[in-house]
Image: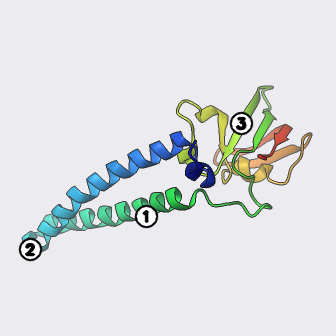
Amino acid sequence: MSEEAESKGLAGASRDRINAELARLRERRDRLEVEVRNDRGSVSDHADAADAIQRADELAGLDERIGELDRLLRAGPSPSNGTDTLPGGTVVKLRFPDGAVVKMQVISVIEETPIGGEAETLTAGSPLGLALAGRKAGDTVTYTTPQGENQVELLDVKYPT
């Protein structure tokens, strides 16, 4: 991992995925910008106007996402304040109600998820991630999901050094 990537808190694979997404978004944005420019004088009916508005909205959304990813590459994931979220890189070992024991690594942003490692990652801001903040091994943790309330037992927690 390069010093810059390390200092920004993003692994090389995460940076690569973010850069690839940025390239796709910028390409789409360039094409869409031409369409929006062409819309300015060619709107002839309500359907055309609706399409033009939709393209302009999409362009604004693309600009917002490109800005988010640019900031992420420059500054890295937002640091936690130490009290309400687990720091990225924390590894937790959990026992679920069905008896399954799972080791998961806490990530700050979804773009840090290793390819194929979705089942072993936990975002710090997820309901479970938030519920685990400030807990210690041996604690039973209750958290709420859209499907209802769940519980896990925190078997082990290792913070990044």
Name the quarter where the N terminus is drawn: top right
Q: Which mark is residue 99?
A: none
Residue at (52% x, 43% y) in the render: 14
Which residue is nearer to you in this view: 72 or 118?
Answer: 72
Which of the two labelled residues, at mark 3 and mark 1, occupies the earlier sequence position? 1
Mark 1 Cα within 10 Å, few/some/many (few <14, many 20+)? few
Q: Quadrant of residue 55?
A: bottom left
Q: Amino acid at mark 3?
A: Met
At numbered mark 1, what does the secondary structure look like: helix, strand or loop? helix
Residue 7 in picture, x, y percent from top left? 62, 54
Q: Residue at x 37, y 63 (%)?
A: 61
In front: 3, or 128? Answer: 3
> What residue sits right under mark 3 in the picture?
104
Percent coordinates x, y for residue 6 in the rendering: 61, 49
For disc 2, the marked residue is 41
- Label 2, label 1: how far apart the Cα atoms are: 29 Å
Disc 2 vs disc 3: which is toward the camera?
3
The circle on residue 67 is 1
Q: Residue 5, position in %: x, y?
A: 56, 49
**Residue kind at label 2, given as amino acid type:** Gly
Density class for disc 2 (Cα within 10 Å; few <14, some 14-19, many ≥20) is: few
Where is 25 relative to 100, above or below?
Answer: below
> Which numbered disc, 2 or 1, marks the residue closer to the eye?
1
Q: Is residue 99 left or right of residue 57?
A: right
Q: Position of residue 119 (x, y in %)?
A: 63, 32
Q: Is residue 3 left or right of residue 73?
A: right
Mark 3 Cα shell of 10 Å, populated few (<14), some (14-19), many (≥20): many
